[in-house]
Image: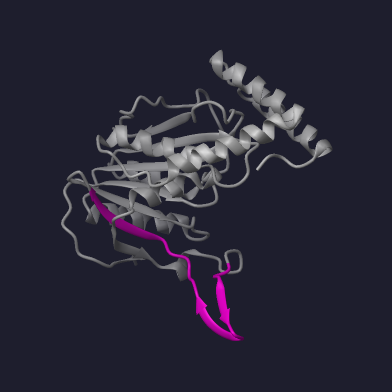
Amino acid sequence: MALFELVEPVDLVAPTIVVAFDTWVDAGAAATTAVEELATDSTVVARFDPDALFDYRARRPPLEIRDGVLAELTWPELTVRHATIEGRDLLAFSGPEPDYRWREFAESVVDLVDRFAVAEWISVGAIPAAVPHTRAVPIIGTASGSAQLTSGVSRGPDGILRVPSAAISVLEMRVAEAGVPALGYFAQIPHYVSGPYPAAALELLGVLSRHLGVDLPIGGLAEESRQLRQRLDLAAAADESTRSYVERLESMVDEARLPAGDELISEIERFLRQQGSQGDRPN
């Protein structure tokens, strides 16, 4: 039994589906922000069953109480929306990462991809990393099956990396197994920044634009990125340990020598120890 319902009939020509879920691999809300911008002018064409996929005790629906009256509940939504940009059909698949039934969810997604005759799957994500906010946001890629990274982004990182999986990765692998080219773009954002990081969302949209060959909407992300950069610069300038740490990361980037493996972990741990003894991290 499918976990989704089709909402709006639509005729599509070789659509690309772009996918992002919140929380895991969505550092700084960069991935979901990018997909929301992509779907600025869109129509919901499919909706997944929230009761089957979400733990409401872990993700409690917001309740609005007006003058002592329980007035409105907002349930989580996991939807697929259709947008046409420069004559190209795109599907934006976003919402909360499901808590339950990942394997059944993956089979339903393969069914949906087949129904819409999807030509390409693109996962979008963001991960915290030892990178400075003063340099361009690095993007790493994944590619499965016959998928090709055509935006100038390389697959990475090299070697074997074992991490807790995300639902989006489960879907990417299953869709590739079903014969659909599947790839992913993942932004690396400064681990010392808390809260939204619009610069990463902007960079992801730039990569997607190059990959798809269309100009995607960016809304107010450029101005938001500029304002956040100013605040981070001021915060770093006001704290010697943060400033020296950012400078160290800058030198690694400029030398094309970002820390890897144990060095990356020790860099982050050293910085967090210093911040723990001197105050909160910049936000």
Task: Provide the major secondary structure of the magenta segment.
Answer: strand
Quadrant for the N terminus, please: bottom left
Most foreground residue, 58 or 281: 281
* Residue 278 seen by the camera: yes
Q: Position of residue 261 (x, y in %)?
A: 63, 25
In the image, farthest residue toward the right: 277
281 lies above or below 271: below
Q: Residue at x 84, y 37 (%)?
A: 277
Most foreground residue, 246 or 73: 246
Q: Position of residue 186 (x, y in %)?
A: 46, 36
Q: Is residue 84 left or right of residue 250?
A: left
Q: Position of residue 279 (x, y in %)?
A: 79, 40
Q: Position of residue 19 (x, y in %)?
A: 38, 48
Assess whether residue 76 is covered by the magenta stretch. Answer: yes
157 lies above or below 195: above
- Range covered by the magenta-colored residues: 60-84
Q: Residue at x 62, y 36 (%)?
A: 232
Could you say which quadrant of the image residue 283 lies in?
Answer: top right
* Residue 201 seen by the camera: no
Q: Is residue 202 left or right of residue 28?
A: left
Assess whether residue 140 is covered by the magenta stretch. Answer: no
Could you say which quadrant of the image residue 266 lies in?
Answer: top right
246 lies above or below 185: above
Could you say which quadrant of the image residue 5 lies in?
Answer: bottom left
